[in-house]
Image (spheres, rainbow, N blue to C red):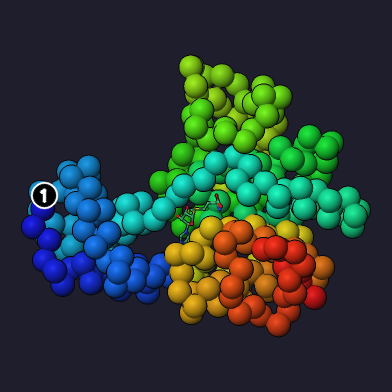
């Protein structure tokens, strides 16, 4: 265990909120110290102060490490699968072509790949997905495209065979047929993000739970201005209680339509 001064934990909490929008409440502040201890141990820091001085000087590597150890990246293929069915139905109903989708906070990629499998299974090939996340370490995993058995709890046998190659027992690699539809980028939802073209669909699921009202509001404004009129926003199933920008209307459980 490292000797971490009490004030340092509060500094971490403030930085994580200021830069990444992640709100750690008083009741959860105790969760920071074990994470920082893990970081210091795994990344072979000599003392806690070595790490904190690096952070203070604005060293980008230490900030990336902080993101890696502080964020929760849990995900799996076809999580909250009703959204993929809704997306498919909406594409068919609206006869959309050259479909553009932004998967914000995509973690290691299971969510955008679930979208791609859903569309390809129906013969829809003219789509592009921008998949982004704050955490570079998950994006590196995403780029490798290697997934273990525990991520496939909701994937059909057919999809596993069609879209993955078996690397070893319980380890699968994504096929290029799926990968080619996806562009991976590091984006922080707290930045002032502007895209040259708005998207038809945006998935931003299971990240709002880590934000407070101010960060949620900021993110929702970004998402709303990045959607085409008539476009749809999908948020996590448990994330339905926010105040929404006036340009978004609730269409179904955790699905919103841009006016
Ligand atoms: C629990 S995962 C959700 C993954 C996927 N969307 C899903 O629903 O399964 C939350 C992700 O949000 C990302 N995240 C947290 N703060 C962020 C921010 N400010 N900007 C972009 N991504 C962020 C984390 O790095 C993490 O990968």
Q: Residues within 10 Å of mark 1 (few under 14, many from 20)?
A: few
Against 140, residue 189 (above or below) is below
Q: Residue at x 56, y 71 (%)?
A: 219
Position of 122 with respect to 59 (left or right) is right
Which residue occupies the foreground of this view, 195 or 52?
52
Residue 197 visible, this orientation: no
Does residue 241 appear in the picture of this structure?
yes
Q: Is residue 172 above or below residue 91?
A: above
Q: Residue at x 90, y 55 (%)?
A: 93
Q: Secondary structure at mark 1?
A: loop
Q: Quadrant of residue 28?
A: bottom left
Residue beneath label 1, please? 1
What residue do we see at 62% from left, 54% from top? Answer: 103
The foreground one among 125 and 235 is 235
Residue 107 rendering spot, x and y as whole percentages: 50, 49
Kindly indicate the quadrant of the structure image that contains residue 233.
bottom right
**Residue sitting at 73 percent across and 59 percent down?**
201
Number of numbered markers: 1
């Amino acid at each position: 265990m490292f000797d971490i001064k009490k004030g340092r934990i509060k500094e971490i909490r403030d930085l994580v909120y200021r830069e990444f929008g992640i709100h750690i409440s008083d009741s959860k502040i105790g969760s920071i110290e074990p994470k920082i201890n893990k970081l210091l141990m795994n990344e072979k820091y000599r003392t806690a102060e070595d790490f904190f001085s690096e952070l203070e000087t604005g060293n980008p590597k230490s900030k990336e490490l902080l993101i890696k150890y502080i964020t929760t990246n849990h995900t799996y293929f076809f999580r909250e699968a009703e959204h993929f069915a809704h997306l498919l139905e909406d594409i068919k109903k609206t006869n959309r072509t050259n479909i553009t989708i932004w998967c914000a906070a995509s973690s290691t990629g299971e969510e955008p790949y679930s979208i791609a499998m859903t569309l390809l299974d129906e013969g829809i090939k003219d789509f592009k997905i921008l998949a982004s996340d704050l955490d570079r370490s998950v994006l590196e995993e995403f780029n490798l495209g290697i997934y273990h058995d525990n991520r496939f709890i909701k994937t059909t046998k057919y999809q596993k065979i069609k879209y993955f190659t078996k690397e070893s027992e319980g380890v699968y690699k994504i096929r290029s047929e799926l990968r080619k539809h996806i562009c991976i980028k590091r984006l922080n939802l707290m930045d002032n993000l502007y895209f040259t073209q708005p998207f038809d669909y945006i998935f931003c699921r299971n990240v709002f739970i880590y934000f407070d009202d101010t960060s949620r509001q900021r993110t929702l404004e970004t998402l709303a201005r990045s959607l085409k009129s008539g476009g749809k926003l999908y948020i996590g199933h448990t994330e339905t209680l926010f105040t929404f920008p006036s340009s978004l209307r609730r269409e179904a459980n955790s699905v919103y339509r841009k006016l």
